[in-house]
Image (spheres, rainbow, N blue to C red):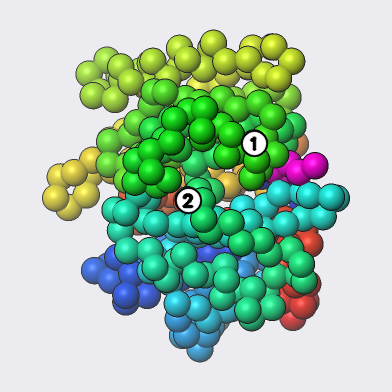
């Protein structure tokens, strides 16, 4: 038996990748590094260990010299970009042991170079970063961490447009995608969202931009109250479909609507896919992306607190991160206890 671990499972740390000159951050590299300094500072300040991929340990140590070095593990690696959510290990429990599944990653359906990203987990295995016998090669199947959500009870939430994309696994039908998720992740109840898309999103509607599962039969979702917003109709259809979903016991979900940030544009006038659904959950904290919109940021944090009343909610400014069409959850991958070699956490 196997099952996908929920994000709020006890974790040893979180995996990030530092921007470097060969990533798409090169045009604003100093600003991007400052963004990652903010993120790492927020995590380490709250007692979360950071495992940081970097091109040069010496340069990374210099950037984070003012932070607690015992809370950061630097690992030199080669990678195309920084979105560890989508190429980092996806964790399951099998036979009462955690396993890190290394699925194939092809740049969100061949949109971007991903040859180096796709080898990161194998690199970590070779360097003995994984605990012995926890790494599992699943590279024959393309699957990104941001495309799936679970309640920890073998229910899985995803989107049709992503899982059935023709450029990922040849264009699976819903039934074929369902079969693969059951086989590889142990899912027993799978919900496919057919609606929902944010302008500027490159992922074919990753679920972590739209709707998130929480304990106690709760789904938080990205809402839109502005009739004039071009996303309004599609997000309204998504909300309607969510009201029709039932859990494995046949019960409807308790829905919590997250506000939509006011539109944010890049230097070319293109709208960016800012969303509050892209938060990171740990056993004790919610790390929430904020966008310098005080009232909306506050409302989003208050809404998440309803779903996780015993968690501390910490806002992290992600205005730079969104410039590359991702946010806080996209840039991180939680590391459940026992997945990585404990030596790297005991500096």
At x 53%, y 43%, the residue is 279
At x 42%, y 23%, the residue is 194
At x 39%, y 57%, the residue is 106
The image quadrant that residue 201 belongs to is top left
Q: Residue 192 location, x and y as percent?
A: 50, 26
Q: Residue 14 location, x and y as percent?
A: 62, 60
The residue carrying pointer 2 sits among few (fewer than 14), some (14 to 19) or many (20 or more) residues within 10 Å by Cα, namely: many
The residue identified by callout 1 is 182
Residue, far left: 268
Front-most of 88 and 190? 190
Query: In the rendered image of this protein, does residue 158 appear above or below residue 200?
Result: above
* Residues tagged 2 and 1 counted as in contact (Cβ below 8 A): no
- 222 falls in the magenta region: no
At x 23%, y 40%, the residue is 271
Q: From which residue to which does the magenta span run?
A: 1-5
Residue, far bottom: 58
Disc 2 or 1, which lies upstream in sequence?
A: 2
Query: In the rendered image of this protein, does residue 29 appear above or below residue 172?
Result: below
**Residue 23 in view in this figure:** yes
Of helix, strand and loop, which one carries label 2?
strand
**Residue 300 in view in this figure:** no
Q: Residue 180 location, x and y as percent?
A: 57, 39
Query: In the rendered image of this protein, does residue 195 appear above or below residue 139?
Result: above
Q: Residue 87 location, x and y as percent?
A: 50, 58
Q: Is residue 316 found left or right of 205 in the rendered image? A: right
Distance Cα–Cα, label 2 vs label 1: 15 Å
Label drawn at residue 142: 2
Of helix, strand and loop, which one carries label 1?
helix
Front-most of 178 and 25? 178
Q: Quarter of the image for the N terminus: give it.
A: top right
Q: Quarter of the image for the C terminus: give it.
A: bottom right
């Amino acid at each position: 038996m196997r099952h996908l671990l929920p994000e709020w499972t006890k974790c040893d740390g979180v995996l990030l990748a530092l921007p470097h000159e060969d990533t798409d951050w090169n045009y604003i590299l100093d600003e991007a590094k400052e963004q990652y300094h903010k993120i790492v500072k927020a995590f380490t300040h709250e007692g979360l260990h950071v495992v940081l991929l970097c091109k040069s340990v010496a340069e990374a140590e210099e950037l984070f010299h003012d932070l607690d070095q015992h809370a950061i593990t630097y690992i030199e690696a080669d990678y195309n970009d920084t979105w560890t959510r989508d190429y980092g290990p996806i964790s399951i429990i099998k036979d009462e042991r955690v396993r890190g599944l290394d699925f194939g990653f092809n740049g969100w359906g061949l949109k971007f170079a991903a040859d180096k990203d796709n080898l990161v987990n194998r690199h970590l295995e070779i360097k003995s970063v994984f605990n012995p016998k926890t790494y599992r090669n699943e590279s024959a199947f393309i699957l990104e961490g941001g495309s799936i959500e679970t309640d920890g009870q073998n229910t899985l939430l995803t989107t049709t447009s992503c899982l059935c994309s023709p450029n990922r696994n040849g264009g699976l039908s819903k039934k074929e995608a369902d079969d693969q998720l059951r086989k590889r992740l142990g899912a027993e109840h799978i919900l496919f969202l057919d609606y929902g898309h944010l302008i500027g999103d490159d992922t074919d509607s990753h679920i972590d931009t739209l709707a998130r599962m929480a304990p106690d039969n709760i789904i938080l979702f990205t809402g839109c109250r502005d009739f004039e917003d071009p996303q309004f109709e599609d997000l309204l259809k998504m909300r309607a479909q969510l009201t029709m979903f039932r859990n494995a016991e046949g019960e409807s979900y308790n829905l919590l609507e997250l506000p939509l940030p006011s539109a944010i544009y890049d230097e070319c006038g293109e709208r960016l896919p800012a969303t509050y659904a892209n938060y990171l959950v740990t056993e004790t904290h919610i790390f929430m992306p904020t966008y310098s919109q005080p009232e909306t940021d506050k409302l989003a944090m208050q809404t998440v607190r309803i779903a996780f009343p015993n968690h501390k909610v910490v806002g992290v400014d992600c205005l730079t991160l969104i410039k590359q069409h991702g946010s806080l959850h996209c840039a991180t991958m939680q590391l459940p206890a026992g997945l990585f070699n404990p030596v790297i956490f005991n500096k």
